Image (tube, rainbow, N blue to C red):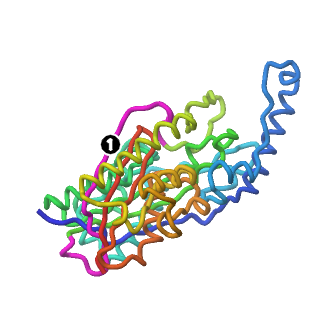
Amino acid sequence: MYTPAITGTGVFTPENTITNAELVQAFNAYADKQNAENAEAIAAGTMEPLQHSSEEFILKASGIQNRYVMDKTGVLDPGVMHPSLRQRGDEEPGIMTEMAVDACTKALAQAGRTAADVDLVICAASNHERAYPAIAIEIQQALGIDGFGFDMNVACSSATFGIQAAADMVRSGSVRAALVVNPEICSGHLEWRDRDCHFIFGDVATATLIERIEDANGPHFEILSTRCATAFSNNIRNNNGFLRRSRPEGVVDRRDMQFMQNGRKVFKEVLPMVSKHIGDHMDIEGVEARDLKRLWLHQANKTMNDFIGKKVLGREPEAGEQPNILQDYANTSSAGSIIAFSKFSDDLEDGDVGLICSFGAGYSVGSVIVKRHS
C-alpha cells in the first residue's frame, strides 16, 4: 500500500469577465423587453411582470461580485441571454479539453512532473459537452498520457469524489499518479433570464495531481483521509444533461432543462448534512477543530460557507482560516474548493492540517483531510 499526496494544482481562468453591473444592465434590459411584449397579459393579471435585478440584491444573496465566462457576448445580449459557444467539428479538440489541458499543464509544472509520470485522468465535472467518447480520454490524448481515463459527474462534489477515486487507486498501487481535472462551463446550463439565479455561476477549470508521497519532488499535501456521501434530492436539478450551446429555433424552451434550485430547502437540508459529514469525518480520524489550520469549502454561497465554518470550528472563522473566492469567480461548481485550495495553501507550514470539502446536487458531499509537508 502507498500513501497518496497532492503534489500540484492548476487553475485555468477564462479571459472574459462579467461584473454584477454588466449582468444587471443586461438582465434589466431583457426584463423590460419581456414586460413590453407582454403588456396586455400583465395588465389583465394573467402574467406577472419580471422584476429588475440589482447589484445590491446579488451581493446580499451570494457574496458574488464578478464571474469569468467562456463567452460574454451572448450572455449580455438581451435578445440571446446565454453563451454563444461554437459547435465544434468532431476532428477538433473539445472546449472542455482545451480548458483542462491548461489547468493540467500548470499542475504538472508545479509538481515537477510530465505526462510520462501520469497513468490516469479523471474528468470530474457537473456537466459535459457530450456523452461519449469520454472527455477524460480526449484530455489524456491531448496531454500525451499513456494509461486510461474516465468521466465522473457528482455535480458540485465531482472534484472531491474524483480525488477519493484517484487517491484510492494510488494507494492500491494500480496507478502511480493521477490527474483529477474539473473543467466547469457552468454558464452553459445556467438560466440567465431567471432573476433568482442569473448571477450564480462562472466558468473555470482546475486540476489536481495525486501521486505516491515518496515520489513527491517538493512541497505537497499528504492525503490523510477521504470521505463521500450522497442522498437523493430533486432540490437542485438540471434536466438538460449535457452542455447547452444555444436554443435552436423551433425547439421548445423548457425552463426545467436548465439549472433549477429550491434555495430555501437546499439551505435547510444541505447545511446540517455538510456540517455533520465534516464533523463525523474529523471524529473518525481523530482531528479536533483546533487542529484545522484551514477549510477550503465549496464556493456556492458566502452565507452557507460562513455557517459551515462556524459549525465546524465552533466559532467564527478568523481571517484566512476559510478563504472565499466567490467574489471573484462566483460559483464554479466542483472547481470552487480546488480554486480556494490552489490559491490559499502555499503559506501553510510543515505538519499543518486542512480540509477540502465540496457539496451540492445529489445531494452529495465529499471531504478530504490533508497534511502539509514542506
Magenta run includes residue 231: yes
> Start and end of the magenta stretch?
213-242
Left or right placement of residue 83 versus residue 52 in this view = left
Residue 246 at x, y percent in the picture: 61, 42
Label 1: which residue? 229
Give whichever of 210, 241 is nearer the camera.
210
* Quadrant in which residue 47 is drawn: top right
Q: Is residue 17 visible?
A: yes
Quadrant where the N terminus lies? bottom left
User: Which of 208/370 is in front?
Assistant: 370
Q: Is residue 135 above or below residue 252?
A: below
Q: Residue at x 38, y 50 (%)?
A: 158
> Mark 1 belongs to which amino acid?
Ala
Residue 283: give x, y in percent of width and height: 27, 53
Residue visible at 32% across and 60% down? 288
Q: Of helix, strand and loop, which one carries label 1?
A: strand
* Residue depicted at 67% across the width and 59% down the height: 65
Residue 265 picture location, percent across and down: 53, 34
Residue 207: x and y in percent read 39, 63
Residue 93 visible in the shown view: no
